Image (cartoon, rainbow, N blue to C red):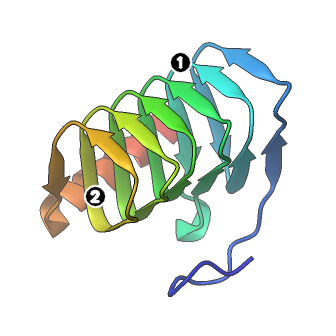
Amino acid sequence: MIFGRRKKIHIDTLIDKDMIIRGDTKVSGGVRLDGKIYGNFTVSNIDNNGMIVMGSESLVKGNILSNHIIIDGKVIGNIKSSEYIEINSNAEIHGDIEYNNIEIHAGAKVIGSLKKMNQKEIGKVLKDEQDKNN
């Protein structure tokens, strides 16, 4: 798949609309989420290709961390994206967003603050994630 200006992204994992995950979830690569996650959701940045694509009926009740994030569902929690986040018109977010680059479409609901991370903050997020993996 190719998303806008971004590079080609490969989806490795599908969390289907009938799936409910309870507890913190960590995966690597590209993830398509159509189901629900009750817990923090982290996608590791394998070669900077960590990606979450949330479908229109998806839900995450917890914090999200990934390089690239496309949201068309609902998030109740904070979001950190070290590269790019796209918030589509059907999306609803209740939480703070920290980002490097962001695109918000008309109609999206964001209830929380937006903060652009500087290079030092992005490096810290990536280092903290790498340290957790070791």
On screen, residue 107 above or below 17: below
Instruction: Tell me what residue is drawn at x 18 percent, y 50 percent.
Output: 114
Instruction: Tell me what residue is drawn at x 65 percent, y 45 percent.
Output: 56
Q: Which residue is mark 2?
A: 99
Name the image quarter holding the N terminus.
Answer: bottom right
Q: Amino acid at mark 1?
A: Gly
x, y percentage for residue 23? 61, 13
The residue sitting at the front extreme is 107
Q: Is residue 134 visible?
A: no
Residues marked 2 and 1 touching at CB (< 8 Å): no
Disc 1, SS? loop
Mark 1 is surrounded, within 10 Å at the Cα level, by few (under 14), some (14 to 19) or many (20 or more) other residues, namely: some
Q: Which residue is mark 1?
A: 39
Instruction: Tell me what residue is drawn at x 59 percent, y 29 percent.
Output: 59
Q: Is residue 22 visible?
A: yes
x, y percentage for residue 105? 40, 65
